[in-house]
Image (cartoon, helix red, strand yellow):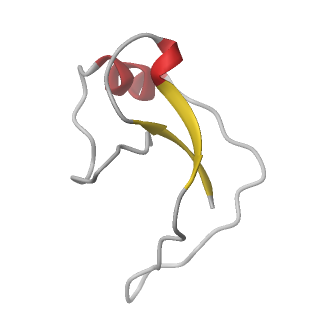
Amino acid sequence: MWAVVIEKYGSPEVLQLKEIPNLEPSRGEVRVKVHTSALNRADVEQRKGNYPPPLPSEYEIPG
């Protein structure tokens, strides 16, 4: 799957489009196919390092 990822904090140029492994849903969760996406204010703050990511990972996926 493709995702916008944050590998380091900084200006908008740190955002990268990267192919990552498919995330497998856990019990009680579903997978949704997304056709269009955007970044919101919380995502911008996360990119700057001012908003903690939801889960620890080798890279962050906003949202």
Apparent side of residue 53 relative to residue 12 in the rendered image (left or right): left
Q: Quadrant of residue 8 in the image?
A: top left
Residue 53 in the image: above or below residue 10: below
x, y percent for residue 36: 75, 44
x, y percent for residue 44: 43, 20
Q: Residue furthest top?
A: 11
Which residue is pictured at 25% across the width and 22% down the height? 49
Rendered-image quadrant of the N terminus: bottom right
Q: Residue furthest bottom?
A: 27
Which residue is pictured at 38% across the width and 83% down the height? 26
Q: Quadrant of residue 25 in the image?
A: bottom left
Residue 60 in the image: above or below residue 57: above
As rendered, which of 55 and 57 lies closer to the eye? 57
Apparent side of residue 39 relative to residue 11 in the rendered image (left or right): right
Apparent side of residue 17 relative to residue 35 in the rendered image (left or right): left
As rendered, which of 18 and 30 lies closer to the eye? 18
x, y percent for residue 29: 45, 79
Rendered-image quadrant of the C terminus: top left
x, y percent for residue 33: 70, 65
Which residue is pictured at 23% across the width and 20% down the height? 50
| Total number of numbered discs in the rendering | 0
